[in-house]
């Protein structure tokens, strides 16, 4: 029982560009610390957003408690909102 696990996303700000983001550990073993944009995308355009360098996540909205991020459902029947990994927009040095 090492490491701490939080349930639900923490509303916070990106330390780099100060945009509102969702930050959360996703997964149980080898959890990934995810910083995601809070605005959901249209699943129909997901292929425009998702790249090997930028993952997408399912945003589960439980009846009680805050929403939380999960790995994308393998099923096409997924009914969750989809969010993308946060990318800073105010760092021009990444625009190469
Ligand atoms: Zn899903
Ligand atoms: Zn940022």
Image (cartoon, rainbow, N blue to C red):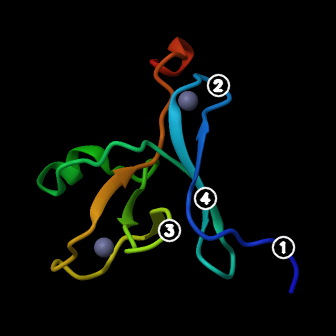
Q: Nearer the viewer, mark 3 or mark 4?
A: 3
In the drawing, what numbered circle is on residue 73? Answer: none
Q: Earlier in the sequence, mark 2 or mark 4?
A: 2
| Residue at figure coordinates x 66%, y 71% from the top left | 31
> Taking 81 as reference, is 11 above or below it?
above
Q: Which residue is at the far top?
A: 92
Q: Position of residue 15 (x, y in %)?
A: 68, 29
**Secondary structure type for disc 4:** strand
Q: Position of residue 22 (x, y in %)?
A: 52, 48
**Secondary structure type for disc 3:** loop
> Taking 64 as reference, is 54 above or below it?
above
- Mark 3 is surrounded, within 10 Å at the Cα level, by few (under 14), some (14 to 19) or many (20 or more) other residues, namely few
| Residue at figure coordinates x 56%, y 65% from the top left | 8
Distance between the alpha carbons at the discs numbered 4 and 1 = 13 Å
Whether disc 4's CB lies below 8 Å from ligand 1 is answered no
- Mark 4 is surrounded, within 10 Å at the Cα level, by few (under 14), some (14 to 19) or many (20 or more) other residues, namely many
The residue pinned by badge 4 equals 24
Q: Earlier in the sequence, mark 3 or mark 4?
A: 4
The residue pinned by badge 1 equals 3
The residue pinned by badge 2 equals 16
- Image quarter for ligand 1 equals bottom left
Q: Nearer the viewer, mark 3 or mark 2?
A: 3
**Secondary structure type for disc 1:** loop
- Left or right position of 9 against 63: right
The residue pinned by badge 3 equals 65
Q: Which residue is at the far front?
A: 64
Q: Earlier in the sequence, mark 1 or mark 2?
A: 1
Mark 1 touches mark 2? (CB < 8 Å): no
Distance between the alpha carbons at the discs numbered 3 and 2 = 28 Å
């Amino acid at each position: 029982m090492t490491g701490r696990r939080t349930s639900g996303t923490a509303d916070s700000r990106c330390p780099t560009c100060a945009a509102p983001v969702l930050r959360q550990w996703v997964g149980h073993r080898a959890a990934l610390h995810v910083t995601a944009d809070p605005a959901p995308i249209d699943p129909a355009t997901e292929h425009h957003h998702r790249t090997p360098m930028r993952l997408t996540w399912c945003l589960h909205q439980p009846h009680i408690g805050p929403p939380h991020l999960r790995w994308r459902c393998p099923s096409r029947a997924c009914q969750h909102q989809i969010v993308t990994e946060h990318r800073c927009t105010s760092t021009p040095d990444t625009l190469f």
